[in-house]
Image (cartoon, rainbow, N blue to C red):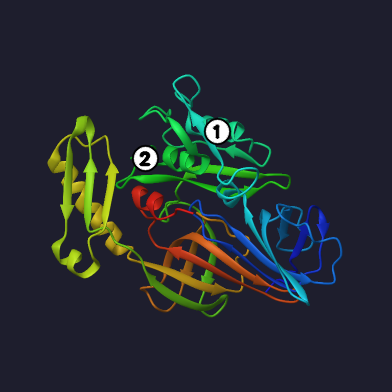
């Protein structure tokens, strides 16, 4: 295993830390960094909202986390510092409790692509210096279905715009996602199509005898009542009574403009149910490698158990570290969740 020595800076000044934990849940939820520094540090009393960078290795030029201090807990021996990335800053940070903008008939985001609309929303909320936008949705769409009006949070605007773009070029609709990356000088919101585990390049391979420490399985919500809206207002609903009895009544609603009849909508809804049922489980693995993996990366797991072997999509990761040691955990699933589930289950 390659030796990594994480490095932390506060407002550009490197600090000595005792230990720390980084968590990136993915899905437009805020990444967090919690770490402890000795209480003997001087000049650290006014830390609120200071910029914090976490470098996975001391030689790295680009951080894996850029955030802002939200809480400081002091004891006689140490200071425990809690920071969130720009997504957390949007919810509770800066000069306002929630980063909001007001959209009217004369001042709005109408007619813009998702990327341009998000860029304008960030500018109106005075957040453009902290976050820039890369990429666009597939398919490219304007923000006119329906037009956005009123006092809206920037984060809700981003989620709404993503929910309006569905790629129907494959058997099942694939959602667009947005994730935060770093370029060394600022945070960037990358908009991209969710990875296809069957066709996208494999970023890393794990084997049970090499770089997997442990594996756990979590059951996730499976939609049992699925509504599909097609072209010109047609729709169809599929429900599975046995699954409802076993898994509860969970709703999923998607759009597929290529469908022109209630029967085709219902058939498509049944295919969605079957796909989600096969992807009923999320997997958490503790590994010796993977600190640089990103949400939406495709990895491969090779084990003697054929049920667990295969390609997976990275959902999130967590890193625990000290000046002398670190451990990495990643959350993965075999099939990405469909659009409505992604949007509804990833609220901050």
Q: Is residue 191 left or right of residue 83?
A: left
In this view, the mark in front (1 or 2): 1
Residue 47 location (% of width, % of height):
75, 57
Q: Measured along the vertical axis of the image, is residue 183 above or below residue 288?
A: above
Crowdedness near tag 2: few (<14), some (14–19) or many (≥20) residues, C-alpha within 10 Å: many
Instruction: Look at the numbered disc 2 and give the secondary structure of its residue.
Output: strand
Q: Is residue 338 left or right of residue 293?
A: left
Instruction: Point out the tag, 1 or 2, that comes first from the N-terminus.
Output: 1
Q: Measured along the vertical axis of the image, is residue 76 above or below residue 179?
A: below
The quarter holding residue 204 reads bottom right
Residue 222 location (% of width, % of height):
29, 61
Instruction: Look at the numbered disc 1 and give the secondary structure of its residue.
Output: helix
**What count of labels does the image hold?**
2
- Checking the image for residue 112, the label placed there is none
At 32% from the left edge and 65% from the top edge, which residue is drawn? 280
- The Cα atoms of the two marked residues, 1 and 2, are separated by 22 Å
The quarter holding residue 69 reads bottom right
- The reply to whether discs 1 and 2 touch (Cβ–Cβ < 8 Å) is no
Residue 310 location (% of width, % of height):
42, 66
Q: Which residue is mark 2?
A: 166
Q: Foreground: 264 or 220?
A: 220
Residue 106 location (% of width, % of height):
48, 19
Q: Which residue is mark 1?
A: 121
The quarter holding residue 210 reads bottom right
At 85% from the left edge and 60% from the top edge, which residue is drawn? 43
Crowdedness near tag 1: few (<14), some (14–19) or many (≥20) residues, C-alpha within 10 Å: many
**The N terminus - image quarter:** bottom right
Q: Measured along the vertical axis of the image, is residue 20 above or below residue 117?
A: below
Q: Is residue 210 left or right of residue 194?
A: right
The residue furthest top is 106
């Amino acid at each position: 295993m390659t030796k990594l020595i994480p490095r932390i800076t506060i407002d550009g000044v490197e600090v000595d830390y005792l230990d720390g934990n980084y968590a990136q849940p993915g899905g437009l939820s805020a990444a967090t960094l919690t770490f402890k520094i000795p209480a003997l540090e001087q000049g650290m009393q006014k830390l609120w909202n200071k910029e914090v960078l976490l470098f996975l290795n001391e030689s790295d030029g680009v951080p894996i986390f850029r955030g802002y201090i939200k809480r400081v807990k002091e004891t006689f021996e140490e200071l425990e510092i809690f920071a969130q990335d720009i997504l957390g800053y949007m919810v509770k940070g800066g000069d306002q409790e929630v980063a909001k903008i007001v959209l009217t008939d004369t001042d709005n985001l109408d007619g813009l692509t998702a990327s341009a609309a998000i860029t304008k929303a960030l500018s109106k909320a005075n957040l453009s210096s902290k976050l820039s936008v890369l990429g666009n949705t597939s398919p490219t769409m304007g923000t006119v279905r329906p037009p956005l009006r009123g006092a809206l949070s920037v984060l809700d605007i981003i989620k709404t715009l993503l929910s309006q773009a569905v790629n129907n070029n494959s058997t099942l609709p694939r959602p667009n996602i947005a994730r935060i990356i770093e370029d060394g000088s600022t945070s960037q919101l990358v908009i991209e199509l969710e990875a296809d585990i069957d066709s996208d390049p494999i970023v890393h391979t794990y084997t049970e005898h090499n770089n997997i420490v442990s594996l756990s399985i979590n059951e996730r919500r499976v939609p049992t009542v699925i509504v599909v809206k097609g072209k010109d207002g047609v729709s169809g609903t599929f429900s599975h009574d046995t699954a409802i009895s076993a898994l509860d009544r969970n709703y999923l609603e998607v759009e597929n403009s290529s469908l022109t009849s209630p029967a085709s909508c219902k058939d498509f809804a049944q295919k969605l149910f079957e796909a989600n049922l096969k992807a009923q489980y999320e997997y958490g693995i503790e590994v010796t490698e993977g600190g640089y993996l990103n949400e939406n990366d495709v990895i491969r797991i090779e084990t003697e158990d054929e049920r667990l072997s295969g390609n997976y999509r990275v959902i999130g990761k967590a890193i625990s570290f000290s000046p002398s040691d670190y451990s990495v955990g990643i959350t993965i699933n075999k099939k990405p969740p469909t659009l409505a589930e992604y949007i509804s289950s990833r609220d901050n």
